[in-house]
Amino acid sequence: MSNLYDGIPLYHGTDNVISSMESANKSVPDYLYVTPNPQYRYIQSSTHAYQASIAIESPYFTDNQSLIESLRSNPERRELLRHLGYDSMVYNDRRNPLKGASGWGDDAAQIVLLTPSKSVLTWSDVSEQRNELKAPSIEPTPRSAIIGPVFHATTSHFAQFAHEASTDIGFHFGSRKAANQRLEKIYGTPEIRIEENTASHNDVLAARLESGELSGEPHYPVLQLLLKKLSNPKPDLEVTLSKMSIDELADISQEYINKPDNANYQNRIENARKEGTYRLQLDGETIANGLTKKMAKALKETVKAGMFKTAYITLHRPLEIDDHGVWPAEDMLKASVPSPQQRDAFYALDNDEERYAFARQALINKGYDGLVYKNAVEDAGSTSYVAFSRDQIRVEPPRLPALDTPEPAPESRPRNAI
Protein backbone atom coordinates (compact mmCIF):
# COMPACT_ATOMS: atom_id res chain seq x y z
CA MET A 1 0.00 0.00 0.00
CA SER A 2 1.07 3.56 -0.59
CA ASN A 3 2.14 5.23 2.67
CA LEU A 4 0.95 8.69 1.58
CA TYR A 5 -1.55 9.03 4.45
CA ASP A 6 -0.52 6.16 6.74
CA GLY A 7 -1.08 7.19 10.34
CA ILE A 8 -2.64 10.53 9.34
CA PRO A 9 -6.31 10.96 10.37
CA LEU A 10 -8.62 12.31 7.67
CA TYR A 11 -12.03 13.92 8.12
CA HIS A 12 -15.39 13.91 6.39
CA GLY A 13 -18.39 16.16 7.05
CA THR A 14 -21.98 15.23 6.20
CA ASP A 15 -25.60 15.81 7.21
CA ASN A 16 -26.15 12.02 7.18
CA VAL A 17 -25.67 9.73 10.16
CA ILE A 18 -23.00 7.18 9.27
CA SER A 19 -22.73 4.41 11.84
CA SER A 20 -20.24 2.41 9.77
CA MET A 21 -18.62 2.37 6.36
CA GLU A 22 -21.44 0.06 5.24
CA SER A 23 -23.93 2.84 5.88
CA ALA A 24 -21.49 5.36 4.41
CA ASN A 25 -21.48 3.39 1.19
CA LYS A 26 -25.27 3.64 1.09
CA SER A 27 -25.33 7.40 1.57
CA VAL A 28 -22.26 8.02 -0.62
CA PRO A 29 -22.31 5.01 -2.96
CA ASP A 30 -19.21 5.53 -5.04
CA TYR A 31 -17.06 8.37 -3.72
CA LEU A 32 -16.11 10.18 -0.53
CA TYR A 33 -14.39 13.53 0.11
CA VAL A 34 -11.91 13.67 3.01
CA THR A 35 -9.29 16.16 4.21
CA PRO A 36 -6.56 16.16 6.92
CA ASN A 37 -7.79 19.49 8.34
CA PRO A 38 -10.73 19.05 10.80
CA GLN A 39 -11.17 22.84 10.88
CA TYR A 40 -12.08 22.92 7.20
CA ARG A 41 -15.24 24.99 6.81
CA TYR A 42 -17.43 22.24 5.36
CA ILE A 43 -16.56 19.89 8.25
CA GLN A 44 -17.36 22.52 10.87
CA SER A 45 -20.65 23.46 9.16
CA SER A 46 -21.89 19.89 8.58
CA THR A 47 -24.25 18.22 11.05
CA HIS A 48 -21.85 15.33 11.59
CA ALA A 49 -18.08 14.91 11.40
CA TYR A 50 -16.22 11.63 10.99
CA GLN A 51 -12.59 10.61 11.25
CA ALA A 52 -11.12 7.93 8.99
CA SER A 53 -7.83 6.20 8.35
CA ILE A 54 -7.31 5.29 4.71
CA ALA A 55 -5.05 3.33 2.39
CA ILE A 56 -4.47 4.84 -1.04
CA GLU A 57 -2.98 2.57 -3.68
CA SER A 58 -3.18 4.52 -6.98
CA PRO A 59 -3.77 8.27 -6.57
CA TYR A 60 -4.45 10.65 -9.45
CA PHE A 61 -2.65 13.82 -8.36
CA THR A 62 -3.94 17.22 -9.42
CA ASP A 63 -2.89 20.81 -8.83
CA ASN A 64 -6.32 21.98 -10.00
CA GLN A 65 -8.70 22.61 -7.11
CA SER A 66 -11.66 23.12 -9.47
CA LEU A 67 -11.02 19.67 -10.98
CA ILE A 68 -11.18 17.80 -7.69
CA GLU A 69 -14.25 19.73 -6.55
CA SER A 70 -15.98 18.99 -9.87
CA LEU A 71 -15.95 15.23 -9.26
CA ARG A 72 -19.12 15.42 -7.13
CA SER A 73 -21.15 16.52 -10.14
CA ASN A 74 -19.36 14.47 -12.82
CA PRO A 75 -20.05 10.74 -12.42
CA GLU A 76 -18.62 10.08 -15.90
CA ARG A 77 -15.28 11.54 -14.84
CA ARG A 78 -15.27 9.38 -11.69
CA GLU A 79 -16.03 6.34 -13.86
CA LEU A 80 -13.22 7.27 -16.25
CA LEU A 81 -10.73 7.48 -13.39
CA ARG A 82 -11.76 4.06 -12.09
CA HIS A 83 -11.42 2.50 -15.55
CA LEU A 84 -7.92 3.98 -15.72
CA GLY A 85 -7.01 2.21 -12.47
CA TYR A 86 -7.08 5.12 -10.01
CA ASP A 87 -8.65 4.68 -6.57
CA SER A 88 -8.54 8.37 -5.61
CA MET A 89 -7.90 11.92 -6.71
CA VAL A 90 -5.51 13.86 -4.49
CA TYR A 91 -5.05 17.64 -4.38
CA ASN A 92 -1.94 18.31 -2.32
CA ASP A 93 1.50 19.92 -2.28
CA ARG A 94 4.48 17.86 -3.49
CA ARG A 95 6.46 18.72 -0.35
CA ASN A 96 3.68 18.28 2.19
CA PRO A 97 0.71 15.90 1.75
CA LEU A 98 -1.27 17.84 4.38
CA LYS A 99 -1.26 21.09 2.40
CA GLY A 100 -3.26 21.96 -0.68
CA ALA A 101 -1.44 22.12 -3.99
CA SER A 102 -1.13 25.91 -3.85
CA GLY A 103 1.00 25.57 -0.70
CA TRP A 104 -0.36 28.86 0.62
CA GLY A 105 -2.00 29.75 3.93
CA ASP A 106 -4.60 27.30 5.22
CA ASP A 107 -5.16 25.62 1.84
CA ALA A 108 -5.65 22.02 2.99
CA ALA A 109 -5.22 18.83 1.01
CA GLN A 110 -8.37 17.34 -0.45
CA ILE A 111 -8.81 13.67 -1.30
CA VAL A 112 -11.67 12.04 -3.18
CA LEU A 113 -11.86 8.30 -2.54
CA LEU A 114 -13.26 6.64 -5.65
CA THR A 115 -13.65 3.24 -3.96
CA PRO A 116 -14.44 4.08 -0.30
CA SER A 117 -15.30 0.51 0.66
CA LYS A 118 -11.74 -0.56 -0.24
CA SER A 119 -9.85 2.55 0.88
CA VAL A 120 -11.31 3.27 4.34
CA LEU A 121 -9.68 1.19 7.07
CA THR A 122 -11.32 2.68 10.18
CA TRP A 123 -14.24 5.07 10.73
CA SER A 124 -15.41 6.94 13.85
CA ASP A 125 -17.81 9.74 14.79
CA VAL A 126 -16.00 12.86 16.07
CA SER A 127 -18.90 15.32 15.84
CA GLU A 128 -18.67 16.34 19.50
CA GLN A 129 -14.88 16.80 19.52
CA ARG A 130 -14.46 18.53 16.18
CA ASN A 131 -13.79 21.99 17.66
CA GLU A 132 -10.83 20.63 19.66
CA LEU A 133 -9.33 18.59 16.83
CA LYS A 134 -6.21 19.98 15.20
CA ALA A 135 -4.63 19.26 11.86
CA PRO A 136 -1.41 17.23 12.27
CA SER A 137 1.91 18.69 11.27
CA ILE A 138 4.78 17.01 9.46
CA GLU A 139 8.20 18.12 8.33
CA PRO A 140 7.95 19.06 4.65
CA THR A 141 10.29 17.37 2.21
CA PRO A 142 13.24 19.67 1.41
CA ARG A 143 12.96 21.25 -2.03
CA SER A 144 16.43 19.93 -2.89
CA ALA A 145 15.23 16.34 -2.44
CA ILE A 146 12.42 16.67 -5.01
CA ILE A 147 13.71 16.11 -8.53
CA GLY A 148 11.63 16.82 -11.59
CA PRO A 149 10.02 16.89 -13.85
CA VAL A 150 11.65 13.67 -15.03
CA PHE A 151 10.30 11.22 -17.57
CA HIS A 152 9.65 7.51 -18.09
CA ALA A 153 8.29 5.95 -21.29
CA THR A 154 6.45 2.65 -21.61
CA THR A 155 3.93 0.90 -23.83
CA SER A 156 2.05 -0.73 -20.95
CA HIS A 157 -0.83 0.91 -19.13
CA PHE A 158 -0.69 1.42 -15.36
CA ALA A 159 -1.96 4.06 -12.96
CA GLN A 160 0.89 3.58 -10.50
CA PHE A 161 4.30 1.95 -10.62
CA ALA A 162 4.52 -1.55 -9.17
CA HIS A 163 5.54 -1.98 -5.54
CA GLU A 164 8.95 -3.29 -6.54
CA ALA A 165 10.97 -3.20 -9.73
CA SER A 166 11.28 -6.97 -9.59
CA THR A 167 13.74 -7.45 -12.46
CA ASP A 168 15.65 -4.18 -12.18
CA ILE A 169 17.39 -2.25 -9.43
CA GLY A 170 14.62 0.34 -9.33
CA PHE A 171 12.55 2.75 -11.40
CA HIS A 172 14.48 4.70 -14.06
CA PHE A 173 13.74 8.32 -14.99
CA GLY A 174 15.57 10.75 -17.21
CA SER A 175 15.20 13.63 -19.63
CA ARG A 176 12.28 13.89 -22.03
CA LYS A 177 14.63 13.16 -24.94
CA ALA A 178 16.09 10.08 -23.23
CA ALA A 179 12.61 8.68 -22.52
CA ASN A 180 11.54 9.25 -26.12
CA GLN A 181 14.70 7.60 -27.50
CA ARG A 182 14.24 4.59 -25.22
CA LEU A 183 10.61 4.25 -26.28
CA GLU A 184 11.52 4.29 -29.98
CA LYS A 185 14.52 1.97 -29.56
CA ILE A 186 13.01 -0.73 -27.35
CA TYR A 187 9.25 -0.62 -27.38
CA GLY A 188 7.98 0.64 -30.73
CA THR A 189 4.43 1.87 -31.21
CA PRO A 190 1.69 0.14 -29.19
CA GLU A 191 -1.62 -0.82 -30.80
CA ILE A 192 -4.63 0.63 -28.99
CA ARG A 193 -7.97 -0.54 -30.36
CA ILE A 194 -11.65 -0.03 -29.59
CA GLU A 195 -13.76 -3.09 -30.38
CA GLU A 196 -17.50 -3.62 -30.06
CA ASN A 197 -18.69 -6.52 -27.91
CA THR A 198 -20.76 -9.03 -29.86
CA ALA A 199 -22.39 -12.26 -28.75
CA SER A 200 -24.10 -15.21 -30.44
CA HIS A 201 -27.88 -15.49 -30.57
CA ASN A 202 -27.79 -18.41 -28.12
CA ASP A 203 -25.60 -16.55 -25.64
CA VAL A 204 -28.03 -13.62 -25.67
CA LEU A 205 -30.88 -16.08 -25.07
CA ALA A 206 -28.94 -17.65 -22.16
CA ALA A 207 -28.39 -14.24 -20.55
CA ARG A 208 -32.10 -13.34 -20.92
CA LEU A 209 -33.14 -16.70 -19.45
CA GLU A 210 -30.71 -16.28 -16.50
CA SER A 211 -32.15 -12.84 -15.71
CA GLY A 212 -35.77 -14.05 -15.93
CA GLU A 213 -36.49 -11.80 -18.86
CA LEU A 214 -37.71 -14.84 -20.82
CA SER A 215 -40.23 -17.03 -19.02
CA GLY A 216 -43.62 -18.70 -19.39
CA GLU A 217 -43.01 -20.97 -22.38
CA PRO A 218 -42.75 -24.73 -21.63
CA HIS A 219 -39.54 -25.11 -23.65
CA TYR A 220 -37.66 -22.30 -21.86
CA PRO A 221 -36.42 -24.38 -18.85
CA VAL A 222 -35.05 -27.05 -21.23
CA LEU A 223 -33.51 -24.39 -23.48
CA GLN A 224 -31.77 -22.85 -20.48
CA LEU A 225 -30.52 -26.28 -19.37
CA LEU A 226 -29.09 -27.15 -22.79
CA LEU A 227 -27.43 -23.76 -23.25
CA LYS A 228 -25.74 -24.35 -19.92
CA LYS A 229 -24.56 -27.87 -20.76
CA LEU A 230 -23.69 -27.81 -24.49
CA SER A 231 -20.35 -26.54 -25.82
CA ASN A 232 -21.70 -25.60 -29.27
CA PRO A 233 -25.49 -25.45 -29.26
CA LYS A 234 -27.03 -25.21 -32.75
CA PRO A 235 -28.25 -21.74 -33.80
CA ASP A 236 -31.82 -23.03 -34.29
CA LEU A 237 -31.98 -24.80 -30.91
CA GLU A 238 -34.83 -22.64 -29.59
CA VAL A 239 -36.94 -23.16 -32.72
CA THR A 240 -36.40 -26.92 -32.50
CA LEU A 241 -37.38 -27.12 -28.84
CA SER A 242 -40.44 -24.91 -29.28
CA LYS A 243 -41.95 -27.54 -31.61
CA MET A 244 -41.53 -30.43 -29.16
CA SER A 245 -44.18 -31.95 -26.91
CA ILE A 246 -44.06 -31.77 -23.12
CA ASP A 247 -43.03 -35.43 -22.93
CA GLU A 248 -40.17 -34.91 -25.42
CA LEU A 249 -38.94 -31.91 -23.44
CA ALA A 250 -39.07 -33.96 -20.22
CA ASP A 251 -36.97 -36.73 -21.81
CA ILE A 252 -34.32 -34.26 -22.95
CA SER A 253 -34.25 -32.64 -19.51
CA GLN A 254 -33.78 -36.03 -17.86
CA GLU A 255 -30.91 -36.86 -20.25
CA TYR A 256 -28.92 -33.64 -19.59
CA ILE A 257 -29.80 -32.67 -16.01
CA ASN A 258 -26.81 -34.44 -14.43
CA LYS A 259 -24.22 -33.56 -17.08
CA PRO A 260 -21.54 -31.02 -16.08
CA ASP A 261 -21.99 -27.37 -17.04
CA ASN A 262 -19.90 -26.05 -19.89
CA ALA A 263 -16.79 -24.36 -18.45
CA ASN A 264 -17.30 -21.24 -20.60
CA TYR A 265 -20.97 -20.78 -19.78
CA GLN A 266 -20.56 -17.95 -17.25
CA ASN A 267 -18.11 -16.12 -19.52
CA ARG A 268 -20.59 -16.36 -22.40
CA ILE A 269 -23.33 -14.95 -20.15
CA GLU A 270 -21.09 -12.10 -19.07
CA ASN A 271 -20.16 -11.25 -22.67
CA ALA A 272 -23.78 -11.39 -23.78
CA ARG A 273 -24.73 -8.87 -21.10
CA LYS A 274 -22.16 -6.53 -22.60
CA GLU A 275 -23.61 -6.91 -26.09
CA GLY A 276 -23.50 -3.57 -27.89
CA THR A 277 -20.90 -2.08 -25.53
CA TYR A 278 -17.21 -1.57 -26.27
CA ARG A 279 -13.86 -2.75 -24.95
CA LEU A 280 -10.46 -1.08 -25.07
CA GLN A 281 -7.51 -3.27 -26.00
CA LEU A 282 -3.78 -2.57 -25.76
CA ASP A 283 -1.64 -4.91 -27.87
CA GLY A 284 -4.41 -7.52 -27.73
CA GLU A 285 -4.99 -7.29 -23.96
CA THR A 286 -8.31 -5.90 -22.73
CA ILE A 287 -7.88 -2.89 -20.45
CA ALA A 288 -11.55 -2.10 -19.87
CA ASN A 289 -14.82 -3.69 -20.93
CA GLY A 290 -18.52 -2.87 -21.05
CA LEU A 291 -17.93 0.75 -22.10
CA THR A 292 -20.04 3.23 -23.96
CA LYS A 293 -18.46 4.37 -27.20
CA LYS A 294 -17.90 7.82 -25.70
CA MET A 295 -16.12 6.35 -22.67
CA ALA A 296 -14.03 4.01 -24.82
CA LYS A 297 -12.79 6.93 -26.94
CA ALA A 298 -11.96 8.96 -23.81
CA LEU A 299 -10.09 6.02 -22.31
CA LYS A 300 -8.12 5.46 -25.50
CA GLU A 301 -7.06 9.11 -25.57
CA THR A 302 -6.01 9.09 -21.91
CA VAL A 303 -4.21 5.73 -21.97
CA LYS A 304 -2.18 6.81 -24.99
CA ALA A 305 -1.20 10.10 -23.31
CA GLY A 306 -0.36 8.32 -20.05
CA MET A 307 2.27 6.04 -21.53
CA PHE A 308 4.78 8.86 -21.52
CA LYS A 309 4.94 9.48 -17.78
CA THR A 310 5.98 12.75 -16.22
CA ALA A 311 6.99 12.47 -12.58
CA TYR A 312 8.64 14.12 -9.59
CA ILE A 313 10.82 11.80 -7.50
CA THR A 314 12.13 12.20 -3.97
CA LEU A 315 15.81 11.38 -3.49
CA HIS A 316 17.43 12.36 -0.19
CA ARG A 317 20.72 10.48 -0.69
CA PRO A 318 21.27 8.94 -4.14
CA LEU A 319 24.49 7.09 -4.97
CA GLU A 320 26.35 8.61 -7.92
CA ILE A 321 27.23 5.81 -10.30
CA ASP A 322 28.21 5.13 -13.93
CA ASP A 323 25.61 4.17 -16.51
CA HIS A 324 25.46 0.36 -16.46
CA GLY A 325 23.21 -0.01 -19.50
CA VAL A 326 21.26 -3.16 -18.57
CA TRP A 327 21.95 -2.72 -14.82
CA PRO A 328 22.78 -6.31 -13.76
CA ALA A 329 22.11 -7.21 -10.15
CA GLU A 330 25.76 -8.28 -9.66
CA ASP A 331 27.00 -4.78 -10.53
CA MET A 332 24.51 -3.21 -8.15
CA LEU A 333 25.68 -5.45 -5.32
CA LYS A 334 29.30 -4.43 -6.01
CA ALA A 335 28.26 -0.77 -5.78
CA SER A 336 27.21 -1.40 -2.17
CA VAL A 337 30.73 -2.74 -1.32
CA PRO A 338 29.42 -5.99 0.12
CA SER A 339 31.07 -8.21 2.70
CA PRO A 340 32.17 -11.74 1.74
CA GLN A 341 29.14 -13.10 3.60
CA GLN A 342 26.80 -10.84 1.58
CA ARG A 343 28.39 -11.99 -1.68
CA ASP A 344 27.92 -15.64 -0.70
CA ALA A 345 24.28 -15.03 0.27
CA PHE A 346 23.66 -13.17 -3.00
CA TYR A 347 25.01 -15.95 -5.24
CA ALA A 348 23.02 -18.55 -3.30
CA LEU A 349 19.77 -16.95 -4.46
CA ASP A 350 17.70 -18.74 -7.10
CA ASN A 351 16.48 -16.02 -9.46
CA ASP A 352 16.93 -12.44 -10.69
CA GLU A 353 14.02 -11.09 -8.70
CA GLU A 354 15.59 -12.22 -5.42
CA ARG A 355 19.03 -10.97 -6.47
CA TYR A 356 17.75 -7.50 -7.38
CA ALA A 357 15.86 -7.30 -4.09
CA PHE A 358 19.01 -8.32 -2.20
CA ALA A 359 21.22 -5.77 -4.01
CA ARG A 360 18.63 -3.02 -3.55
CA GLN A 361 18.38 -3.71 0.17
CA ALA A 362 22.18 -3.73 0.48
CA LEU A 363 22.26 -0.21 -1.00
CA ILE A 364 19.42 0.92 1.25
CA ASN A 365 21.27 -0.45 4.28
CA LYS A 366 24.19 1.81 3.31
CA GLY A 367 21.84 4.80 3.48
CA TYR A 368 21.08 5.25 -0.22
CA ASP A 369 17.53 5.71 -1.52
CA GLY A 370 18.35 5.76 -5.23
CA LEU A 371 20.96 6.29 -7.92
CA VAL A 372 22.03 9.20 -10.12
CA TYR A 373 24.09 8.79 -13.30
CA LYS A 374 25.10 10.43 -16.55
CA ASN A 375 23.25 8.70 -19.34
CA ALA A 376 25.68 7.15 -21.82
CA VAL A 377 23.07 5.76 -24.23
CA GLU A 378 19.83 7.74 -24.59
CA ASP A 379 20.34 11.52 -24.69
CA ALA A 380 24.03 10.97 -23.89
CA GLY A 381 25.36 13.29 -21.20
CA SER A 382 21.95 14.00 -19.65
CA THR A 383 21.29 13.12 -16.00
CA SER A 384 19.13 10.10 -15.15
CA TYR A 385 17.89 8.74 -11.85
CA VAL A 386 16.75 5.51 -10.21
CA ALA A 387 14.24 5.53 -7.34
CA PHE A 388 14.26 2.37 -5.21
CA SER A 389 10.63 2.60 -4.02
CA ARG A 390 7.41 3.52 -5.79
CA ASP A 391 6.56 5.66 -2.74
CA GLN A 392 9.32 8.05 -3.87
CA ILE A 393 7.47 8.65 -7.16
CA ARG A 394 4.71 11.16 -7.77
CA VAL A 395 3.36 10.58 -11.27
CA GLU A 396 1.82 13.63 -12.89
CA PRO A 397 -1.17 11.96 -14.61
CA PRO A 398 -2.41 12.69 -18.13
CA ARG A 399 -4.97 15.41 -18.70
CA LEU A 400 -8.50 14.03 -18.57
CA PRO A 401 -10.64 14.53 -21.69
CA ALA A 402 -13.86 16.54 -21.42
CA LEU A 403 -16.59 14.18 -20.19
CA ASP A 404 -18.34 16.61 -17.88
CA THR A 405 -22.01 16.51 -17.14
CA PRO A 406 -23.60 19.93 -16.42
CA GLU A 407 -22.59 21.52 -13.11
CA PRO A 408 -25.65 21.39 -10.79
CA ALA A 409 -27.14 24.51 -9.26
CA PRO A 410 -25.65 25.30 -5.80
CA GLU A 411 -28.89 24.38 -3.99
CA SER A 412 -28.86 20.88 -5.52
CA ARG A 413 -25.25 20.05 -4.63
CA PRO A 414 -24.85 17.24 -2.07
CA ARG A 415 -23.89 18.33 1.43
CA ASN A 416 -21.71 15.24 1.90
CA ALA A 417 -19.03 16.61 -0.39
CA ILE A 418 -16.47 19.36 0.06
Image (cartoon, grey):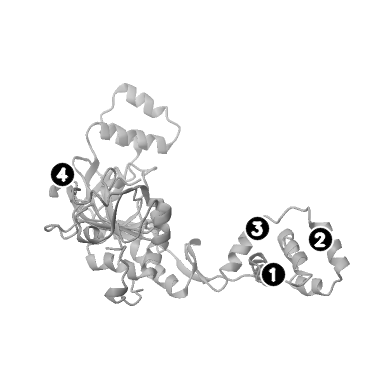
Residue 254 lies, in percent from the top left, at 83, 58
**Callout 2: helix, strand or loop?**
helix
Residue 138 lies, in percent from the top left, at 17, 45
**Callout 3: helix, strand or loop?**
loop
Label 4: which residue?
139
Nearer to us: label 4 or label 3: 4
Residue 164 lies, in percent from the top left, at 36, 43
Sequence-earlier tag: 3 or 2? 2
In this view, 51 is above or below 250: above
The amino acid on which the numbered mark 4 sits, given as a three-letter code, is Glu
The label shown at residue 264 is 3
Left or right of 317: which side holds 122?
A: right
Question: Is the residue marked by circle 1 packed among few (<14), some (14-19), or many (20+) residues within 10 Å?
Answer: many
Nearer to us: label 3 or label 2: 2
Nearer to us: label 4 or label 1: 4
Q: CA distance from mark 4 to mark 1?
A: 63 Å
**Callout 4: helix, strand or loop?**
loop
Q: CA distance from mark 4 to mark 3?
A: 55 Å
Residue drawn at the location 59% of the way across and 65% of the way down: 271
Left or right of 280: which side holds 258?
A: right
The label shown at residue 253 is 2
Question: Is the residue marked by circle 4 packed among few (<14), some (14-19), or many (20+) residues within 10 Å?
Answer: few
Q: CA distance from mark 3 to mark 2?
A: 20 Å
State the residue lying farthest toward the front: 128
Nearer to us: label 2 or label 1: 2
